[in-house]
Image (spheres, rainbow, N blue to C red):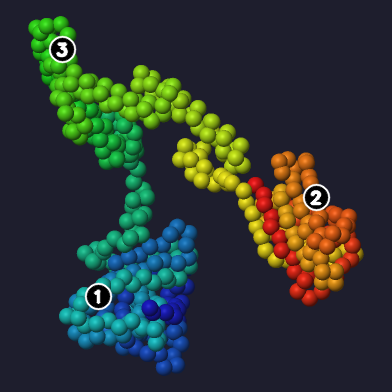
Amino acid sequence: MSSWSYALTNKGRQLQAKAQAGAQLVYTRMAVGSGTLSGQSLESMTALIAPVKDLNITRLKRPAGATRALIGATLTNQDVTTGFYLREIGIFATDPDDGEILYMYANSGATADYITPQGDGVIEKALNMNVFVGSAANITANIDESLVYATQQDLADAIAGIQINDATTTQKGIVQLSNATNSNAEDKAATPKAVKSAYDAAVAAQTTANAANTAAANAGTKADTAIAQLADLASNAAGKGASLISVEDAAGHFTGTNVEAVLAELFTFANDGKTGLASVIGSPATAADTFAQLKTHIQTIKNTLATNLTAKGQSATATETLAALVDKVANIQTGKRFASGNINYQSGNDIFYEVRGLSFRPKLIVIDVAESSMGAAKRRVYNSYPKETIINKYQVETNGQTETPGDWTIYNDGFRVNFNRPFDISGTNGVAQFIAIGD
């Protein structure tokens, strides 16, 4: 894009002074060229360096009170046979004493735009120059009206002066668009959206009306069919009406095809189900009970089963399923439990034997241990049967010696027994044998 440097020429300044004194300032033409400045000042220019084309002035505007005026022309390449760089522009005016002079000169230097010759595409450029006119009162230009075109600003200024009244039902004018579909206003115009909304509502209403007509027609048909069926029922003997009403059974649940046959099948299904449940439950359940009563019988059985399981040491509640309660029966322990084996002594203040890790609390314990120095065998017995509150504890020695029985300690998973009198259990004789029995 070109960057222009411009100034009034010395001749232009002289003519401007004359215009300030009252002389008429007349602009005659605009010219373009391709000349390059070689040290000259803009003010000293009296002609274009390399003129290419003269342009007719088509615009002259000076806002009220302004010290500058806009002078414009249009450059086209219609008659340009050789392309050139648009590097210089001159505005010419008539001096009352010197004739036509170069009033203003502009040069774009290295930023000049290239104008292609005719045939390489149409070029049309609007050239507008702001020139200093000071306070000169009488300014004119030689304008060829046949070449004048309105600029965008010209159109904007013209449009700004147009005033259009609001429209009414009796005159044309400006109206406001509205999306409303329920307004009675006469100074607004409906938008396509409003028209579509009204159209959609009309279509929906028509659809509803069509559906209502169809439903009414179907209802009439069904009513006619029902009246005919009632007439058929009335014409038959009493009690035979159910057999005349057909049943639609697309899933094939019944073999019967009318109400009476289907009711009979349903009764059979229900009665057979109750009979089967009653036979499984047993007394007091009977086939005459309702399903609700049969459920009560089953719940009573669950209550009893849960109570019995709890009594056998199993955690059970009546809210569990019957299958879950039955599974817990297998966990009930039956019969006596026992354990046996060898144990080594342990010493402290007394000599003692201890067994832990059993899966039951022992109630009968027999332990045998040999004493090497005395050649005696000792047997200790602990018995809490039939009740744990009645306990028998005694000791037998094969050499006839007696000693005070030691203390027994019974754990939930084993026992401990003390031998109060020291004795020799060196070597392998220190190993004792035991049998423990519990519930």
Can you tell which of label 2 and label 1 is closer to the viewer? Answer: 2
| Residue 118, horizontal then vertical, whole percent | 19, 80
Amino acid under disc 3: Gly
**Distance of label 2 from label 1 (alpha carbons):** 133 Å
Amino acid under disc 2: Lys
Residue 175 visible from this viewpoint:
no
Residue name at image x 78 percent, y 67 percent: 370
Badge 3 or badge 1: first in the primary sequence = 1
In the rendered view, tell whether residue 76 sits above or below residue 210: below
The residue at which mark 3 appears reads as 241
Query: Seen in the image, is 328 located left or right of residue 129?
Result: right
In the image shown, does 205 or 59 lie closer to the viewer? 205
In the rendered view, tell whether residue 297 sits above or below residue 123: above
Can you tell which of label 3 and label 1 is closer to the viewer? Answer: 3
**Residue 226, quarter of picture:** top left
Residue name at image x 47 percent, y 73 percent: 17
Report the disc number at residue 405. none
In the image shown, does 165 or 96 lie closer to the viewer? 165
